Amino acid sequence: MRTEQITLTAGDAEVDVLPGNGGRVGGLRVGGTELLRQGERFGCFPMVPWCGRIRDGRFRDGAEVRQMPLNAPPHAIHGTARDGVWKVARHTDAETVLTYDLTEPWPYPGRVTQLVALTPDSLTLTMSVETYDASFPAQIGWHPWFNRNLGDGGEDVRLDFGPAWQEERGDDHLPTGNRIEPRPGPWDDCFGMPGGVDVTLTWPERLELKVTSREEWVVVYDEQEAAVCVEPQTGPPDGLNTLPRLVTPLEPLEATTVWRWRRL
C-alpha cells in the first residue's frame, strides 16, 4: 500500500517512513519542526541500484550492454527502488527495517535492505544490496530534500563542506572525467571527500544538522528555491560505467549515512 506510514519516535524527534512510496523517509521533525520538503516525490528517497544519471540509460556489464528506461531523457536517473513498494521486515518504536527485491527493468535478481534508526539527536540510514545469483555492478545513495527555510521568519539554510575536488560537469549534467577545484554554487554537482562525506547544514539560530558517511562521494543540489539536497553515495553519477562496485554472492554492497543535529 502506497499510503502505509510508519512513524518512529525518540525524544522530541519523529520520522515518517513510507514503505509503499519507494522506501523513503517522508518526514523528519525535531521539536515539531519539519526538516524535509513534503510531497510524494520528496522527503528522502533511497537511490539504488544506481545513483544520479546513467548516460543514455546504458551501462556495460562485461561484454553486455544493459539499457534502463530513460526517466530523465536522455538519461536514466536515481535507480528503480524509489518507484517500488518495500516490505517491512521489522519495526520498533525507534527503528524499522525494510526490504525490496530488485525486479524489472533491473536485469539482475537481488535484495535491498534498508535500516532506519532514530535517536533523540540523530537518524541513521543503512542500506545493503546482496545477490545469491549473478554478480552485478551497483550503487547506493540517499537523496534528501532539506527545507531551505524552516519558517517563522528565520534565515535560509547555509551549507558548509570542504571537498577535495569537484567533478567537472558537462552540458549533459554528467561528470566529464576531469577533477577541478571546487567552485561556488549554485550546484548540481558531485564532489569528492576522501576522508568521508561531512556536510553541515545550518539554519541560523535554529538548528545545525551534520550529514556524514564513510563514503567519499556527495552530490549537492541547491538549484531549487524550496529545498537543498545533500546526497552521500558510493560513487559518482554514471558510476555504473566509470567506477562500478560489484555485488557478488560473497560480497554485498553496503553504505551508511548519519544525520546528527543540535539546536542553536
Image: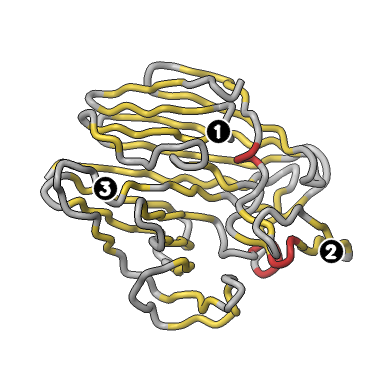
For the N terminus, the quadrant is top right
First in sequence: mark 3 or mark 1? 1
Q: Secondary structure at mark 2?
A: loop
Q: Tell me the distance, in whole angstroms, between the alpha carbons under discs 3 and 1.
A: 22 Å
Q: Quadrant of residue 159?
A: bottom left
Residue count near mark 3 (Cα–Cα under 10 Å), binned few <14, some 14–19, many ≥20: many
First in sequence: mark 1 or mark 2? 1
Q: Horizontally, is 103 left or right of 233 in the view?
A: right
Q: Which residue is mark 3?
A: 209
Given contact means CB atoms under 8 Å apart, are the residues at marks 3 and 1 in contact? no
- Residue at 48 percent across and 57 percent down: it is 215
Q: Tell me the distance, in whole angstroms, between the alpha carbons under discs 1 and 2.
A: 30 Å
Q: Horizontally, is 13 left or right of 74 in the view?
A: left
Q: Amino acid at mark 1?
A: Gly
For the C terminus, the quadrant is top left
> How many callouts does the rendering have?
3
Residue 261 point in image, percent of width and height = 24, 42
Q: Which residue is mark 1?
A: 23
Q: Horizontally, is 122 left or right of 117 in the view?
A: left
Q: Which residue is mark 2?
A: 62
Q: Amino acid at mark 3?
A: Leu
- Residue at 22 percent across and 55 percent down: it is 156
Q: 75 or 133, which is in the foreground?
A: 75
Task: Choose mark 1 or mark 2, whichever is in front.
Answer: 1
First in sequence: mark 3 or mark 2? 2
- Residue at 27 percent across and 28 percent down: it is 13
